[in-house]
Amino acid sequence: MELMDAYGSPLYVYSRTDIENNWREFDQAFGAHPHLVCYAVKANSNIAVLNVLAKLGSGFDIVSIGELERVLKAGGEASKCVFSGVAKTVIEIERALEVGVRCFNVESESELDRINTVAKSIGKKAPISIRVNPNVDAKTHPYISTGLKENKFGVDIGEAIDLYKKANNADYLEVQGLDCHIGSQITDVSPFLDALDKVLALVWQLNDEGISIHHLDLGGGVGIDYDGEQTINIKAYIDAIINKVGQTEIILEPGRAIVGNAGIFVTKVEFLKQNSEHSFAIVDGAMNDLLRPSFYNAYHQVLPVNENATGTKAQWDLVGPICETGDFLAKNRDLSLSEGDYLALMSAGAYGFSMSSNYNSRPRVAEVMVSGENHQLVRKRESVQDLFAKERLYEG
Ligand code: LLP
């Protein structure tokens, strides 16, 4: 309540301690095994979040120049950044080379050629991995499954050898590693280990060709508990990796598992509206603020901020003010609600704010970080003026 009074509604709230603990769980599970935990910036790219992780020594998985500049601004090291994404532009490649990123994860032959050309033009070798598509089913939502042949990501694992040979012969490329990422919100370890087996078979083949792989980047994708689901035991997952890879350095790119359960989205009940069929709680947050329910039919637990709230008991649909039937945050939740109540959508730290937009000309909400008893604004709520500050009337 104190936070709502101080910062208003709707609001994202992140726990610094949870972010730190989640990152350390990955880092410490490796023990002395060579490794780098590269937080996937897309999950939550607020510079305060990045700064907390940079202070722990985290690496970063970036997919755009915007994410790269955010990491640098937040005190992260370029030499700990891996650059993923299917279509890096010339400008992005130039900047990444200039600041010295750790590795480019290359997703196609054309991209490999482009990186070589740009590297040549600035006279600096580009460290690369090829992202292979191991063709395993991550058994997750189709929009966030990336390791199947039908997906746009990576290079078919059967074709990777030839591409590696080409990279190895290119004057301005330096083969560093091998990369794969099979999807997101994966709650069972077996697809990861199946992918790893396929990747390791390729590493031996490459060895036979005289191409050595110095690190394996196994991507992100570790799922979290949204609805009481059984998730992956991180220590067991990392032990299983270490058991298979000898002394090869491992890079992981967790996003959701670091920030997902470290954040909530708080929204206020504006109106209650009941008809013979449905009970709607119209809240001040909407699909532009938290897209996951509308976009993936994702489930976020809803808890009352004031636990003693008494109100109308029903199965409520939480809907926002946006003019779309798909504008909902939750459906059929047993809650006792009154107008003016605050509700927390749990596990909203990942792909919450970072996927938000200004749709319906709604200013993006504020973000706050808490640490023990302290709290701080880490992104100011946008003003209405901000909405069109970059727009111009057409003159003439
Ligand atoms: N590495 C690569 C190359 C990725 O594409 C992703 C996520 C990650 C790492 C981090 O994955 P994570 O550990 O967070 O699962 N917006 C969706 C998730 C999209 C994931 C995209 N790629 C959602 O809200 O569920």
Image (cartoon, grey):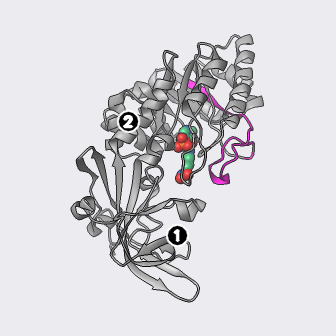
Front in this rendered view, residue 97 or 197: 197
User: Which residue, given by chain and number where applicable, does mark 1 sit on?
Assistant: 333
Identity, as a three-letter code, of the amino acid under mark 1: Arg
- Asked if the stretch drawn in magenta spans residue 135, the answer is yes
- In this view, the mark in front (2 or 1): 1
- Looking at this rendering, what residue extends furthest in the right direction? 158
State the CA–CA distance, disc 2 to disc 1: 31 Å
Q: Is residue 229 left or right of residue 355?
A: right
User: Which residue, given by chain and number where applicable, does mark 2 sit on?
Assistant: 20
Q: Is residue 374 left or right of residue 69?
A: left
Residue 368 point in image, percent of width and height:
30, 52
Asked if ligand 1 lies within 8 A of label 1, the reply is: no
Q: Residues within 10 Å of mark 1 (few under 14, many from 20)?
A: some
Identity, as a three-letter code, of the amino acid under mark 2: Glu
Residue drawn at (42%, 30%) of the image: 24
> Which quadrant, please, contains the N terminus?
bottom left
Residue drawn at (24%, 60%) of the image: 2
| Residues drawn in magenta | 128-150
Residue 377 point in image, percent of width and height:
25, 52
- Asked whether the viewer can see residue 69, the reply is no
Secondary structure under tag 1 reads: strand
